[in-house]
Image (cartoon, rainbow, N blue to C red):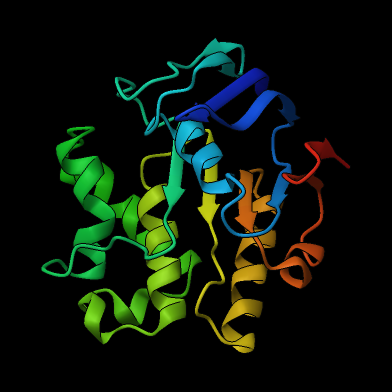
Amino acid sequence: MLTIKNLSKQYNGKVIFKDLNVTVADGQILTVVGPSGIGKTTFLRVLAGLTKADAGEISLNQHPLLLNENRTGAEVGVIFQDFNLFPQYTVFENITLAPRIVARQHRRVYQPQAEELLAQLHLTEQRDFYPFQLSGGQKQRTAIARALAMQPGVLAYDEPTSGLDETTTQQVVTVIKQLQQQGVTQIVVTHDRPFADQLSGAVLDFGTDVVR
């Protein structure tokens, strides 16, 4: 369970969010909606430990998470809007890079895990492709597989349908729902309300800070 208590952040005196309280149960989807520029991505970066919070608490399964950039764990895996895939590495190499270098896993551990993720996300045929050879949806699924390879407690998406056509957007919806069925806790940041409406779970409206 992810628990957020009294989380606050401001830039240059401007309040981005204040005293935010949210609880996300294991296997739940929380969709964070609101117009561009309202602070949704900042919330995601604070959650992932990429941006320092001013106040509040975040805990995952009752384990407190640091609220600054010094967090070293992979408790929250983030799929960024532009995917951030390494262009010089294949799909397989992108997925296994962090387990190999950061987690220092042996090949006999990370390789079968990566192969399973490739199959699960329908990327086996693209295993040895480079990012420039992938479609937008394939890049999205590669980024999801890379995040899942570190076995995070929470998987977070920043505008996952940005730049995708309707067909590819539906593929993203399918993947998110499949991961939910597998018990993966997910937070989806989006300004695309029709997309958000297709995801079952709680909705945090960043315009009102109301969870429904």
Residue at the spot 36% in from the left edge and 75% down from the top edge: 124
What is the x, y in percent for residue 13? Answer: 51, 27
What is the x, y in percent for residue 88? Answer: 10, 68
Total marks placed: 0
Instruction: Name the residue nearer the viewer: 15 or 188.
Output: 15
**Which residue is farthest front?**
13
What is the x, y in percent for residue 167? Answer: 62, 88
Residue at the spot 35% in from the left edge and 25% down from the top edge: 73
- Residue 68 visible in the current orientation: yes
- Residue 1 visible in the current orientation: no
Residue at the spot 72% in from the left edge and 44% down from the top edge: 206
Instruction: Name the residue nearer the viewer: 55 or 119.
Output: 55
The quarter of the picture where residue 146 lies is: bottom left
**Residue 195 vertical placement versus 209 (above, below):** below
Residue at the spot 76% in from the left edge and 66% down from the top edge: 193
| Quadrant of the drawing holding the C terminus | top right
Q: Is residue 100 left or right of residue 16?
A: left
| Quadrant of the drawing holding the N terminus | top right
Instruction: Name the residue nearer the viewer: 36 or 110.
Output: 36
The quarter of the picture where residue 179 lies is: bottom right
Q: Is residue 188 left or right of residue 97?
A: right
What is the x, y in percent for residue 135? Answer: 38, 85
Instruction: Name the residue nearer the viewer: 83 or 96.
Output: 83
**Residue 4 vertical placement versus 147 (above, below):** above
**Which residue is farthest right?**
212
Q: Is residue 198 left or right of residue 96?
A: right
**Residue 135 vertical placement versus 60 (above, below):** below
